[in-house]
Amino acid sequence: MRRRVTFSRNLTLSLSRTCRCYCKYCAFATHQAHLHPPDEVLEILDGAAARNVKELLVLTGERPEVNPEVAERLREYGHEDFTSYVVWSCERALERGLLPHTNLGVLSREDLARLREVTASQGLMLESVSERLMETVHAGSPTKHPARRIETIRAAGELKIPFTSGILVGIGESEQERMQSLEALAQLHAEHGHIQEVILQNFVPHQRYYGEEPAEIADAAAREYWRTGVAHGRPQLPLPDWACPVSIEDMKRLIAETRRLMPDVGIQIPPNLADWWGELVAAGATDLGGLSANGDHISPEHPFPSPHQVRKELQRDGFALTERLCVYPQYLDPEWLAQGVLDTIKVKYWSFIPRRGSGRTDPPAPIRPSLVPHAIERARDGRPLSPQELTAMFAETRPEAIEEMRAAADELRSELAGELVTFVVNRNINISNVCIVGCAFCGFGQGKRSPDAYEHDEADFVSRIDEAVKYGATELCIQSGIHPDWTLEDYLGWLRLAKATAPQLHLHAYSAMEIAHMCDISGLPPSEVFAQLKEAGLGSTPGTAAEVLHDGVRARISPNKLPVARWVEIIEASHRAGLRSTATVMFGLIEEPWELAEHMRVIRELQERTGGITEFVPLSFIPFQTLLGRTHGVEEISREENLKHTAVFRLALGRTIGSLQASWVKMGLDAATEALRWGVNDLGGTLMEESISRLAGSYHGTRLDPDQLVAAAHEAGRPAAERTTLYEIRRRYGLPVAA
């Protein structure tokens, strides 16, 4: 199963390096006066906003105002203490759409509360519970005492602050002390549930930067690394006497123990401090921290790799790199965040907010759960539902109401389609992934010059058709990207070649987007294009490229895609030409319940006008290798939400479309089997190959054999049948007789 590995796109503001502690491993702190003036802060913030950074990491020494010169500068800037200045900086960050994460060291409860009003999250490394380290690496640093740090972390929990902590490995502690440190964090999290991630950081020796600015060294190293992919000048220094070596096996044991103690907490490992980070991801690490655009100010000559570099490496191993905010999704709630911070997230980063019933933006009208019971009754009778009723059903979260929707959808399925579970033996062929559209939800389309672009030649195409015939397929499903060089004759040519190769195959080909493109490049109306396609062998039209039939959603996810009216025009033209079509919805993107309600209105009214739709196919969004997944925080919809939506789709259609399909390649065969209780009567096709979902990151495979689909139907207690594209029954598979 594909796993997501997260990171935060951040920029570091080392507001002050002046520190009251004397930790032996630290090259960041100084005991001279260091403080960025307000104009420099604003310049850094403006630069961060211009680089599309989401998180501002405010990194500082501890209590810098103990230095008289720093205290005097703070007074000149109008601040009674350093926390006040940090609050001012965070306010300016929020104004620019940046989410502050602060790490100021040990703080009082009052200071934590002041910062809570202007931060999305805060952090403090526990480092170690070993008190004996106070005599070695932490000598002269009283606030490094474990009790002081635990006190701060506990206070943050009491204040409901999303918090990051962790341990520093290799500073002279024993393995037992490492495990005890993790146990201490687990206890704090058990008390308050506020630790969103634990950092397992291996110590790396640093040189001293006397007379130099670590931030400048870090920024220069990061720029060079991100530009060239080569990290020059990483120091290889001997371990100090007080330190201890750390092996990859040590780190793997810590990951396993953290997962055991805190299964709901993210596990972060720094990807710049050792080359073993890929192996640690495979061992269970879930996060790479902030891949800071201006480097690591703590270890300035150890730059973070760029997100692009990390993504390429992870993708080879089957992992998907995904941006997150500095505050984890489960804490994006008024209980955990100040309203001003939450307002910034809702304006700038609303797609990162998990789906919770009514969605992540304000609905055009209040959502009324009270409408659901009556709506279920009306839908069960096949009557059309109002937009408000459909919205309430898509937004429903009450288990008892969802069960009522399931039962009603299952009854409607039984009335319209009976108990038979159907499937088609088919083959998908995606001739080319070259595409000029650029959809944010797609991991398939590539630019013409991309090294990942492909285009089958005629020999490849014919060999795939021959394989389909030998497999027993009755349908060939053909779709591709919108290729900039193809003409109408090219599209016709593929159909003619398929028909000449295997005249017995039904050709189910070309999305509404492809056909609209044919109209554009040929100057012909849809009716004429369909006439030529039909003559070349087209048998029916896939109702894909629908996504969500709401122009607001389409503008957000694919502004270059055909608008709703054009999609409807193409599908209607298909029906007028005597060609049946399917209809689809892609859900679980960034659409809202009321926008899905509009989609279902459009589909139902289209079917009532033409009667040309053979089946409705819900397609849950696969986010992993797509722009929406990588940079907008959109997660795969849960199995429970997927099934709920399936039931609502059935109820929304009433008696207008008899067949509802579950896409096993999207939701998995187990969930598709369960969907047979939620209004589904069809399990789709065998596919044989499937590129679009696979390249988006689907982990459910690209082929199922007929006996697997039959077994799924039988597991649900239902007989199965192989059908044709147009729902003629070819072969029946009755339920096995019980012994």
Image (cartoon, helix red, strand yellow):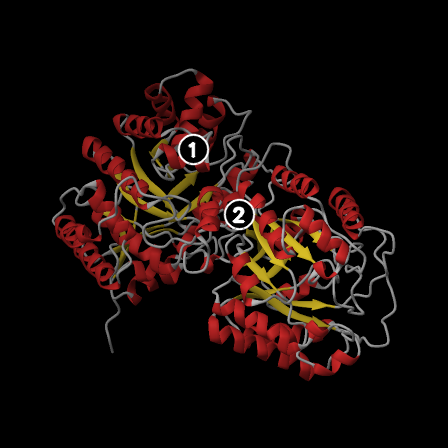
Q: Position of residue 412 (x, y in %)?
A: 17, 53
| Image quarter in which the C terminus is found | bottom left
Q: Amino acid at mark 1?
A: Ala
Q: Amino acid at mark 2?
A: Leu
Q: Position of residue 467 (x, y in %)?
A: 48, 47
Which dot marks residue 260? none
**Considering the numbered disc 1 on the image, is that residue within a helix, a strand or a loop?**
helix
Q: Nearer the viewer, residue 31 or 453?
A: 31
Identify the residue at image location x=25%, y=47%. Answer: 367
Q: Which residue is mark 1?
A: 555
Q: Badge 2: few (under 14), some or many (20 or more) residues near its Cα, within 10 Å?
A: some
Q: How many dots with numbers?
A: 2
Q: Position of residue 28 (x, y in %)?
A: 77, 59
Which dot marks residue 695? 2
Indicate the quadrant where residue 727 lies.
top left
Of the image marks 1 and 2, the number of the one nearer the N terminus: 1
**Rounded to the nearest whole Å, what is the CA distance between mark 1 and mark 2?**
23 Å
Indicate the quadrant where residue 131 lies.
bottom right
Is residue 517 visible in this depiction of the protein?
Answer: yes
**Considering the numbered disc 2 on the image, is that residue within a helix, a strand or a loop?**
helix
Q: Nearer the viewer, residue 639 or 681?
A: 639
Q: Is residue 45 left or right of residue 674?
A: right
Q: Nearer the viewer, residue 205 or 42?
A: 42
Q: Is residue 233 left or right of residue 254?
A: right
Is residue 707 visible in this depiction of the protein?
Answer: no
Identify the residue at image location x=37%, y=22%. Answer: 529
Q: Which marked residue is nearer to the observer: mark 1 or mark 2?
A: 1
Compared to 338, does 286 lie above or below?
below
Q: Badge 1: few (under 14), some or many (20 or more) residues near its Cα, within 10 Å?
A: few
Whether residues under marks 1 and 2 lie with C-beta atoms below 8 angstroms apart, the answer is: no
Compared to 723, does 2 lie above or below?
below
Q: Is residue 572 left or right of residue 353?
A: left
